[in-house]
Image (spheres, helix red, strand yellow):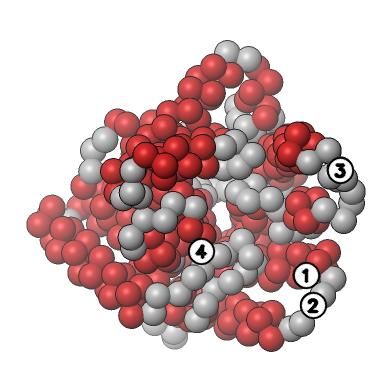
Amino acid sequence: MIEELAKEERYEYLDVAKGIGIVLVIIGHIVFGNNYKMFGAKTISNLIYSFHMPLFFLISGMCIKSTKTFNKSSLKKMTYSYIVPYVIWTIIYIVIFYLIYLIGDNNTTFGINSYKVYHAVTLCGLAPLWFLLALFVAEIMVLWIKSILDKGNKINYRKVRNYRVIRNVAICILIVIVSIICSYFFNKASINNLFLKNMLWGTLRIFPTILFVLVGYILKEHIHKLLRLKLFFRLILITCLSGIQIFLCLKWNESIDVQLFQLGNPLLYFVKAINGSLVVLLLSQVIHSKLLVYIGKKTKELMILHYPPFFYTLIISCLLDKMFSPNIIGLLIIFVVTISCCLFIDWLMCRFRFWDVMMGKNYRGNM
């Protein structure tokens, strides 16, 4: 008996949202850590980091089909999409870093004690490759939670109004509480062993990533329904949520790094992360840009190729620093050059079949 899976509509605005998200990621990495000493760089960086990675996890949750289940077939597909490129690009990153170290200092040794190797072999992952590993684990956990939710949906709970809403909110609150407790003890803990520390923050980071994927899955139908609102009301909603986001980020101008499990005030972070993600999703519904759609479909490629050991950003930053005072124009130049280099490399390599494997695309398993 052949089971026919229901086809769910593809929403173009999600590609636009991913396009906006990867633009923010690249700009965030340009200004992060005084890489580009522009006035207001820290505030811009903190604003972007408050929600840019949660946005991708939330979109991932929105893309989980209601018919999708965790089984051998889905595990194979997720392994191909996330783990294969993670392993391949981790090796490439390490090899390039190794060559750079040799060129920079002939006395440099690259042993197992290397900071970057520890990142690679633990759940922490080399930035930005950690995203692939985190998304793999988060999607598996959400599919498991989804199977429990689906069983609950078959039960008739007439005595309890809005049972599903209460249940979903309770699960999300539980994950938030666990994340806050983990963040508190991680910040208080004194761990000198780098390997153990990497393993710990890579493990604890699972909880907030699960939360964002789960929130995306739970809210997807409600967010899709906002498309039916008149443009005027959507613009008002975008303005209000944007104002809240800016106020929160200026009032509590915290340095956030999800990869390293540095959440600042965890409860406030979750509010900013979800609110900021909703701003981008709503904005994506009113923006119609083929360029952003194209960039959004190349998110994985841009995520991998824009970061060291590919030094477009660093080289252009150094040149502009010497030529001009760092400002918004210089920032845009660095961004355009960086994204152009990444897209050119992808265009050049797309003609080779192994490129799809390296990017975890075009899976041919029996789904």
Which one is closest to the eye, mark 4 or mark 1? 1
Q: CA distance from mark 3 to mark 4?
A: 45 Å
Q: Position of residue 323 (x, y in %)?
A: 37, 39
* Nearest to N terminus: mark 4 or mark 1: 1
Element at label 4: helix
User: Which of the two discs, 3 and 4, sits closer to the camera?
Assistant: 3
Residue tagged 4: 212
Q: Residues within 10 Å of mark 3 (few under 14, many from 20)?
A: few
The image quadrant where one finds the C terminus is: top right
Which residue lies at the image location 33% right of the left edge and 43% below the top edge?
324
Q: What amino acid type is highlighted by mark number 4?
A: Phe
Tell me: 281 left or right of 199: left
Point 41% across, 32% down: residue: 337
Q: Position of residue 86 (x, y in %)?
A: 70, 42
The residue indicated by pointer 1 is: 197
In the picture, the disc for residue 191 is 2
User: In the rendered image, which residue does mark 3 sit on?
Assistant: 107
